[in-house]
Structures are given as C-alpha cells and as structure tokens.
Amino acid sequence: MQYVITLLIALFCFPILGQKDFTINVHESGDPDGLNPLTSKAANAENIEDNLFCRLLEFNRESFQLEPALAVRRPIIKTLDKGKYKGGMSLSYEIHPKAVWDNGSPVTGNDYLFTIKALKHQKVESGGRRLRAEFIVDVEVDPSDPKKFTIYSKKVMFMAEAISGNSFHILPEYVYDAKKVLRGISIPELDDKRKAYSEAVNEFADDFNSAKYSSEEGFVVGCGPYRLVEWSTGDLISLERKNDWWGDQVDNKYLKAYPSKINYHIISSIGWAFSKFEKGELDIIRNVPPKRFKEAKEDEAYLKMTEFHDPSQFAYHYLAFNSRNPKLSDKRVREAIACAVDQDRIVNELFGGAAMKAKTPISPHRMHYNINIKGVTYDLDKAKELLAKAGWKDSDGDDILDKKIDGKQVKLRLKYNYNKGNVVRKAIGEMLKTSLAEIGIKMDLYPIDFADLLATANERNFDIIALAWVNTPGSDDLKNVWHTSSDVDGGGNRVGFGNARTDRMIDEILVTLDEQHRKELYLELQEEIVAEHPYVFLVVPNQLIMIRKGFDYPELGPVSPGFVVRWFQQK
C-alpha cells in the first residue's frame, strides 16, 4: 500500500508520465521590457509570456491555420442581420472546462471580458494592442455557463478571429483587478474618449501599469504551465513548471509542457554566451551572428555537441527615422540616408547570405507583398543630390553639412541607437557611419540596453534607431505600426508616418472581405509607405539557432522564435 501511494505521488510530481525532471537554459541578449502581456512590447517578452499565460487559439506552426488552445474549439462566427449590432458580426467561444487559475478557480469569460476592458482603458499602457481590439464593442458572458461568451463587432472583420483569439493572453481578474473595479464600467464607456473615468477606474490603471505586474513573483500570474520564480535583472529569468497544472489533463498539443524548469540567461555578449554553451550552461543560443554561426558549423568541437538551424521568419530588420526631428522631417534627407545603406553588403557580409533584402513592411513570403517596389539602391551621388536639394551644404568647410533651421545654423549630426551586444546592428551602424561621412553627415553610435532601446523608441527620443518587427503567421494588420492613431507614446508608429488617406486604406483593409480587393489595398499602401522613407527596410533574416544535442523537439519554423521551448523533451 505504501508503495502504491509513493508511486502515485511520483506520478503527480512529474508532468508527463516517464519524463524526468530537467532544466533547459535559453540565451537572451537582453531583458524583456516586462512580463505583463498587455503592456510589454518586446518580442522576447512575448516568447516568455507564452509559457506563463494562454491564448484562446494558436497558429499551427506548419499550416499557419488557427487551432484551439485554451478554447474548446474555434469560435462560432455569425454575421448579424438584425438587432443592436446589425451589419456586424459575433464570435462565440467556450473556454476549456478543465482550465483553472492557480488558486483553483475556473478560467471564465469574465476573465476574457476583464482582459479586453483593461486593454481598452485609455490610461493602461497597452499601445498598439488597444488599436487591435477596437472592433470589439462588447463581450457578453453566458450567465448560465460563464465558460461561454460572445464577442460583438459593429463591422465584419476578416481578421476578427485571429485578433480576438490569438492576439491577447487572458489574465486572471482576481489577481490583476482584485477589487473588481472594471466590473463597474462597460466596454462602450471605455471606448468613449470623451468620458471621464472615476477615481477608482483611474487608480486601476496606475496599479495595472506598475512594475509588480511586470516582474514580481505572485503578480505575474497566468493559467499557463509555468510560474515566474525569479527575475534578476541583467542576469536570469527563471520559470518553474506547476505540478498540478490543469493542461496535463487535456489532450492538446498546444498545452504540452515538458521541462520542469526554463531559465532565460540574459547575456549581452555573444562571446560570453558561446563560452557558457561550451561549458554546458546554455542549451539554446538564438539570434546567433551569422559569422559566429558559420564558424561554429565548421568547428569539429561544436559539430559534436550542436544542432544548427536556420529557418526563415515572419520578421524584418529596419532603421527608423524620427521625422519629428527637424533634421529628418524632409523625406529627401531620409531617402539620402537610405541611399547610403548598402543592402547587398549587409546581406552577404553581415548575414552570410542567410537573409533577403527587405523593401516594404510586408514579408516577401506573403501573397500581398508588392513585388514591383524596387527599393532604394546604394548610391552616394544620388544621396548628395538629395541633400543639396533639401538645402544642406557645408558652409564652414568642416566636412559636415549644415543648414539654418528656425533661425539657427544646425549641423547634420545624428545619433544611431542600437542594443548592446547586437554585433550585427553595431556593424550596420559602422558601415552607415562611414558612408554618411562621405556625403557630409556625422553619425555617432550609441549602444544601450535592450529595455532602454525600446523605451527610447516608445518615447521618440532618437534620431535613427535599429530595431525589428516580428509578426504572426496571420494576415498583416498594419494599424499598430502605420496608422496615425498609433502615433502616441507607447504606440507602434514611432516615426510619425501617416495621413488621412493612408489611415483610410488601413481601416478599409481590416473590413475588406474580398481577398483580391484587400490585396490591391495592401499593394497601394506599401507604395505610399515606401515613398515617404519612414524606415530603411534592411533584411528579412533567417533565424540562426544553436541547440545542444540531447533533446527531442518539433521541426523549427518561421514562427518566432523558431521553436517552442516548453515542447523540448530530454532524450
């Protein structure tokens, strides 16, 4: 009898029958900007959050089709021909009956409703996510079964399922709104920008935006398989698997979780990361610089212990211009700088050929990518002509162009921000610095921590900044990055792009069900964006990933970060 009891305890302690406890150690080049799924903006934050929280739906990483995760099934979608939302649509979901929070209470539609309300609160720092949820005008929870709820929209949106089911992790109301403050305000009231919030509703936002919900154990809480147990800034983020996680009772591949612990090691130096990998202190290095990746593949010692992967990805690297800066407000100056970027050299020398040249904000893998856009070619003579036409000249012979702006003589000297430890972005900056010097522009490189880099971007406190956008397999929703309503602190439109015409096009794309007409809008919008030179579109790179031998895992693919760490099993 004692033996049986001991065996049962052992089975409950191990998440998967026959699976031993093991830890997997992952390299991150910088700290994420928090682990609050509604306020964080960094791609590495979302990668970690995926282990802590759940979405209703997930994208199949091979077919790119939506499939149920926290939801029992995909939603029942209806177009509405009568009633309050006539001409719109409804999406009815059901949350899995086994799904519970850490305190044992069920995950319900009230938690989804809370999440949407928090997202829509004008003082919650949710940035572009709030724009994505604009079409959700109400959420009704079934009073007889709170696991069931229906989302309503006044318009028929072709991306409604992907946005409502996959764009937001669901938060527990009992943790993030213990006083149930948001139950006292409706979604329509939150959408009304003219409405003044009560003191309690305003205090909710201050509390929700606070650091504790981004980084503290006990406040970063989801219904996913792992809990946050440690975050030592600049060093380690540690997740521990829950012994009694509800997902173990459900046969769903998106709910599988094998490692008993996942450690994210924050290491800005790639050399240091390689050293730890050699010692067995790291199991996965991602975003490996192409040169180091190539060298490792040719090193006998690394070949014995490493599996190398280079899947493509739904992402692009870019340089963003702050058009609010008077030096960069003229698009001819921005185009001149773009003419000083040698894309071919970047692809071949810095990425070792494991990248494609980017020309628009749409991935070349998409059907609505505009193949007719040729992009800017490396041409310093053209750059000089453009700068001269924009009124810049070297009036004092110091080899730096200058111009009178608002009555003051201003030199064309710019800052280039990139994150510490990113050798590729540093090399791009050094290449550009040399080219710009030839055309009379002085550029200084400023490496900063990744979290500070994002803050610099969000606060528009930059001249030129090196970043990347990582997208999902779903169709491109350009509102967060290119709509003028997102040109706010924390919004994705960090460059001041847009006008009434481009806004109308973006809005029309979201409600256009006819695929051919939607494609035509995408093609035209890409032309409008590229013509203004808000970015230098650099490359669509392959993901260069090194994984220590000794693990079984699904084939890597283009969905960021290329792998699902919780699906790794020890051989």
Image (spheres, rainbow, N blue to C red):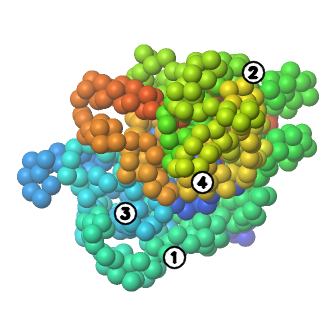
The Cα–Cα distance between marks 2 and 4, rounded to whole angstroms, is 30 Å
The Cα–Cα distance between marks 3 and 1, rounded to whole angstroms, is 15 Å
SS type, badge 4: loop
State which mark lies toward you, 3 or 4.
4
Residue toward you, 43 or 50: 43
Badge 4 amino acid? Asn
Which residue is depicted at the point 57% across and 69% down? 213
| First along the sequence among labels 4 and 1 | 1
The Cα–Cα distance between marks 2 and 3, rounded to whole angstroms, is 45 Å
State which mark lies toward you, 4 or 1.
4
Q: Find disc 2 in the rendering and name its residue.
A: 349
Q: Quadrant of the C terminus?
A: top right
Residue 218 pos. (x, y %): 61, 73
The Cα–Cα distance between marks 2 and 1, rounded to whole angstroms, is 47 Å
Q: Is residue 231 left or right of residue 280?
A: left
The circle on residue 120 is 3
| First along the sequence among labels 3 and 4 | 3
Do callouts 2 and 4 mark residues in contact (Cβ within 8 Å)?
no
Q: Quadrant of the N terminus?
A: bottom right
Residue 239 pos. (x, y %): 68, 59
Classify mark 2: residues with Cα within 10 Å, few (<14), some (14-19) or many (20+). Answer: some
| First along the sequence among labels 2 and 3 | 3
The Cα–Cα distance between marks 3 and 4, rounded to whole angstroms, is 26 Å
Q: Find disc 1 in the rendering and name its residue.
A: 207
Badge 3 amino acid? Lys
Badge 1 amino acid? Asp
Q: Is residue 47 left or right of residue 521?
A: right
SS type, badge 3: helix
